[in-house]
Each structure stands twice: as structure tokens, then as C-alpha cells.
């Protein structure tokens, strides 16, 4: 089977307790990524030493000058040489068949798959990131229209594999995924959604976003929604989706919940 040349980008900031499991899950795959790019966001623990203990010739370790998610993602993209790109969080892990499964879908600009949310000892296979139909879309706007229903969340990087062509991520400290993913999808010619659980997202109280104040979260989310409402003004279904979420997220509701 011909594999996709996937550049996996992992942002690391003091993840010594989780990065080993993350990498072990990647290396448990029969088909491995083309390269693994580690963007170190000013770690002060043993994260990088743990990463260096793995024997893999296609590691790239890049040191960021600041702990900033949007900035770090763009650094990773700058160094990515694979035909496809995907982001894996350093405290998450992937299915043992992920890269083999993705290899079946050569030619798509956006490959979307399903996550399992891991909340302590619970594995949540029914969650707000699941689009229930396995289907392809004739273009990116058609996919966005289908994804733009209030109960669905699609603005997180860890449920996608993107063709590495002219990818742009807005340089936001938070919600950089929410603001960037619709524009990436809208430019796509071929999009597919898989009802395949390829990713395990671990819910915990020590995430990067949990350390950001409610006021700053509100400011970035409103900025994100205002941009997307303007950007998709001529696409009423998509615009209505972001109008809904603009009203939903009020100050005091920016807690540790995802998106």
C-alpha cells in the first residue's frame, strides 16, 4: 500500500508526563509518518530528553521563541516537507491504524476523522466532534455547510489531515484552530469525512487553554466569530453557525470545556 507522506507536527510545552505515550502510539502504527516535527514551546521539564530517547531518523526538533499556539503551529508548517500535514497534541494519542487508514484516501485535500474523548477512565465515543455520515463532498463550501449545525464542532486541528498546500494559520494565542480551519476547508476541492475513530483526545485540567483567563478567551473568541461572520457573509448557513456561537459564548462560560 502506498502511504501518504504525512508531516506530523507536535507542539510541546512541559509534557513530560504524556509525550512518551503520544509518541509510542504513533510508532505502534505499521505505516509511519514521513516526518515528526516537534515544536518546543519553551519547555523547562524533561520533555525534549524523552523525545530524544526515541530512535527515529525523521525527527525535527524546532525551538520556538515563545509559548504561543498560533505562532508555534506556523513554525511547524514552515519546516513541514510532507505532502500532507496533521497536528497531534502532546497529551493525546492516536489509533494504531491511523496512518494506514489515511493512506486509503490519496488525493483528498482534507481528510476528517472521528475522535474519542478520554475523560479519566471514560472513553466517550459519542461526542460533539462526530459528524455521523461517512461521505465525501464536492468542494470545501459544501462540507462547511454540512458541518455548520449547532450541535457539531469542527474547529479543532486534531480531527484532520490536510494536503500541505498553501496552508495558513492565523497567529492567534488561542482559537487559532477555530478561526483558521473554515478557511482551509473552504479552499479544498475534495473533502472526505470518515466515521473512523483515529484519535484519542485526553480531557484534563492542566491544558494550555485552562491557564488563559476567561476575559482573554472571550476576547479571542469574539474576534474569531466576528471575522468568520464577515468572511462568510454570502454563505448564510455558515454565517448563521458563527452568529449562533457568538451569542452562545458569554463571559463566564469560558471555562475548561473544549471549544
Image (cartoon, rainbow, N blue to C red):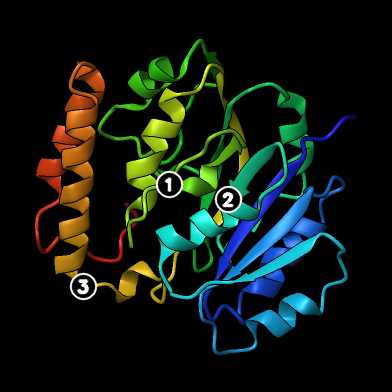
Residue 1 screen position, x and y as percent: 90, 29
Report the residue at 82% width, 57% height from top: 28
Report the residue at 45% width, 20% height from top: 140
Q: Which residue is mark 2?
A: 77
Question: What residue occupies the far top of the structure in this picture?
Answer: 138
Q: Is residue 164 visible?
A: yes
- What is the distance, in whole Å, between disc 3 and disc 2 at their CAs? 28 Å
Q: Are marks 1 and 3 in contact (CB under 8 Å)?
A: no
Report the residue at 53% width, 16% height from top: 189
Q: Earlier in the sequence, mark 3 or mark 2?
A: 2
Q: How many marks?
A: 3
Q: Which residue is mark 1?
A: 169
Q: Residues within 10 Å of mark 2 (few under 14, many from 20)?
A: many
| Above or below 74: residue 238 | above
Q: Residues within 10 Å of mark 1 (few under 14, many from 20)?
A: some
Task: Give the side of residue 123 with respect to residue 68, left or right.
Answer: right
| Above or below 253: residue 48 | below
Residue 99 screen position, x and y as percent: 75, 42
Task: Give the side of residue 10 with respect to residue 67, left or right.
Answer: right
Of the two numbered discs 1 and 3 in the rendering, the one whose residue sits closer to the viewer:
1
Q: Which residue is mark 3?
A: 213
Amino acid at each position: 500500500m502506498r502511504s501518504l507522506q504525512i508531516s506530523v507536527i507536535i507542539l510541546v510545552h512541559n509534557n513530560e508526563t504524556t509525550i512518551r505515550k503520544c509518541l509510542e502510539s504513533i510508532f505502534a502504527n505499521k505505516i509511519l509518518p514521513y516526518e515528526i516535527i516537534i515544536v518546543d514551546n519553551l519547555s523547562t521539564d524533561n520533555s525534549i530528553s524523552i523525545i530524544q530517547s526515541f530512535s527515529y531518523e525523521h525527527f525535527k526538533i524546532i525551538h520556538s521563541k515563545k509559548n504561543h499556539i498560533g505562532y508555534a503551529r506556523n513554525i511547524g508548517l514552515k519546516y513541514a516537507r510532507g505532502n500532507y500535514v496533521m497536528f497531534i497534541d502532546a497529551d493525546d494519542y492516536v489509533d494504531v491504524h491511523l496512518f494506514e487508514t489515511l493512506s486509503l484516501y490519496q488525493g483528498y485535500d482534507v481528510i476528517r476523522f472521528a475522535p474519542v474523548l478520554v475523560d479519566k477512565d471514560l472513553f466517550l465515543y459519542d461526542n460533539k466532534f462526530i459528524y455521523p455520515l461517512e461521505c465525501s463532498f464536492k468542494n470545501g463550501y459544501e462540507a462547511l455547510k454540512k458541518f455548520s449545525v449547532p450541535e457539531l464542532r469542527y474547529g479543532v486541528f486534531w480531527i484532520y489531515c490536510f494536503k500541505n498546500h498553501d496552508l495558513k494559520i492565523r497567529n492567534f494565542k488561542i482559537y487559532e484552530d477555530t478561526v483558521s480551519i473554515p478557511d482551509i476547508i473552504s479552499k479544498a476541492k475534495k473533502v472526505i469525512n470518515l466515521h473512523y475513530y483515529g484519535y484519542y483526545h485526553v480531557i484534563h485540567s492542566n491544558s494550555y487553554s485552562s491557564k488563559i483567563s476567561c476575559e482573554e478567551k472571550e476576547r479571542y473568541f469574539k474576534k474569531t466569530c466576528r471575522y468568520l461572520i464577515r468572511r462568510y457573509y454570502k454563505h448564510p448557513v455558515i454565517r448563521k453557525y458563527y452568529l449562533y456561537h457568538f451569542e452562545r459564548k458569554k463571559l463566564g462560560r469560558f471555562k475548561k470545556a473544549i471549544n
